[in-house]
Amino acid sequence: MSSIFWITIAGAVLTFLTRIGGHLVLSRFERIHPRVEVALNAVPAAVLTTLVAPAAATADWRGLVALAFAGVISLRFNALTMFLAGAAMIILLRQFS
Amino acid sequence: MDEQIYQRDQAASDSSSRTQFWEGFAKGLPIMVASAPFGLLFGALAIDNGFSVGEAVLMSATIFGGASQMVGIELFGHNVPAWLIVFSIFAVNFRHVLYSAAVGRRIGHFKPMQSMLSYFLLTDPQYAETEKRAESGRPVTFIWYLGVATPIYVMWVLEAWIGGLFGNLISDPHAFGIDMLLPIYFLGLVMGFRKRDNWGPIVIASGVASIIAYKTIGSPWHVSIGALAGIFVAVIVAKPKPAQEKR
């Protein structure tokens, strides 16, 4: 079996544990320590930013323009509109400039 | 089998179990439409990052979590060690722990196998719909829950296959900006959390730390280092709220 297969299976098992584990574990505590809750709340933004920032730092100017444009769009519109606008921008810039 | 027994119980006690399924289905449809581009994009990018079509479909069918799947294929494309890819998938999905803890109040009456399946299907929108349903005072039944999840799950798996077939057709990924699509997608997710406490400091800390780590230590460590920097800043700058309750 390929490494992709095992990565996927291991990822799936751990993902399932996150989906059932919160109920099994956290429900045993009367309350969560505020600092732990703060740290948990920070997880999505902290992890996802690391997937954007280095790509922006190493992108060509077209990539930067597309990212900035998508960022502005996201202030007013939903994630799908924002994504399509950013994708359209990068494709246009790569094709015509 | 469990499901059939449940349906029979429902039919005896509540003739509207079919109605409940379609009520859930109606909630699942818009989610299915909104997630379709990402399901297709996942399939196409997975191929671009060295997956086979079958492997892309397997990942969508077993993990069923868009952002974490994108992270998985992105890191795989960068030759990151396997354990770190698995850990990153886990890290991105870790937020589900909170949904899981919260939704336990809503679906605690499901039978054990129904619960297992329901937790497997517990995505961000599934959680949101379940909370809304419960708040409206209407019954959160297993049939209703399945109604929401069915269109989302079935199409998600199909999209990985269709996207994978199309991904094989793209000969010049750079010209189509494929390399920028995931950063744009992740930026959208980051922006989606901007109402949370101390979002700005967290994003700046993760962003700066990840860029520095990327340029000095190198990929893939920029992910862990940047994430820890952001969480560290969140814990430091958080104002201690007196006697904060769990919910």
Image (tube, helix red, strand yellow):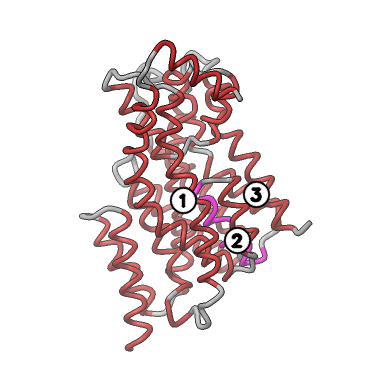
Disc nearer the start of the sequence (2/3): 2
| Residue A82 - label | none
* Chain at numbered mark 3: B
* Chain at numbered mark 2: B
In percent of width and height, residue B44 lies at 52, 67
B13 versus A44 height, above or below: above
In percent of width and height, residue B74 lies at 56, 62
Q: Residue at x 56, y 74 (%)?
A: B168
Q: Amino acid at mark 1?
A: Met
Q: Callout 2: 10 Å neighbours few (<14), some, many (20+)? A: many
Q: Residue at x 50, y 71 (%)?
A: B166
Q: Nearer the viewer, residue B87 or A15?
A: A15
**Co-location on one chain, circles 2 and 3:** yes
Task: Check residue B69 for magenta coloring.
Answer: yes
| Residue under numbered circle 1 | B155
Disc nearer the start of the sequence (1/2): 2
| Residue under numbered circle 3 | B86
Read off the magenta span.
B65-79
**Co-location on one chain, circles 1 and 3:** yes
B125 versus A73 height, above or below: above
B117 versus B77 height, above or below: above
Q: CA distance from mark 2 to mark 3?
A: 10 Å
Q: Quadrant of the C terminus of chain B?
A: top left
Q: Quadrant of the N terminus of chain B?
A: top right
